[in-house]
Image (tube, helix red, strand yellow):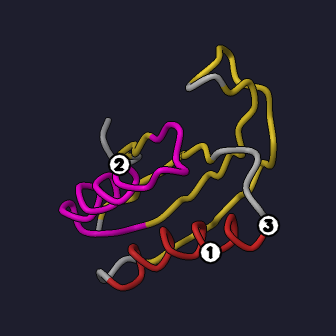
Amino acid sequence: MVKYESMYILKPDMEEEKKDALVKRFSDIVTNNGGTIEKIDEWGKKRLAYPIQYLNDGYYVLMTFEAEPTLPVELERNYKISDDVIRYIVINLDEK
């Protein structure tokens, strides 16, 4: 198992239920593929450094988890196909 950290930014104008559903969906991808989630930290609505898709704000979520090395590819694929994700990154914390 490898330790990862994933940060993703959601569109800020979503309803609370839809936001919670997306956070749950991405965490379920990790747990359903044999990974374990250490922490999900919702930072909330923050100002972006520069406009993205004509948006000035975004809803930040930081997820720390352990999984097999193949899982980040599946997670990134799901980030890409979701219209509500503005930006994302997955970082391997075990690499030196």
**Looking at the image, which is closer to me, 77 or 35?**
77
Q: Which mark is residue 16?
A: 3
The N terminus lies in which quarter of the figure? Answer: bottom left
Q: Residue furthest left?
A: 70
Return the residue at label 2: 80
Q: Residue at x 41, y 46 (%)?
A: 93
Tag 3, which secondary structure? helix
Point out residue 33 in the picture as x, y percentages from the top left corner. Answer: 29, 80
> How far apart are the two marked residues, 2 and 1, measured between alpha carbons?
17 Å
Return the residue at label 1: 21
Q: Per the image, is 83 magenta? A: yes
Tag 2, which secondary structure? helix
- Residues at badges 2 and 3 in contact (C-beta under 8 Å)? no
Mark closer to the chain start, 2 or 1: 1
Q: Residue at x 23, y 55 (%)?
A: 73
Q: Per the image, is 78 magenta? A: yes
Tag 1, which secondary structure? helix
Q: Quadrant of residue 60?
A: top right
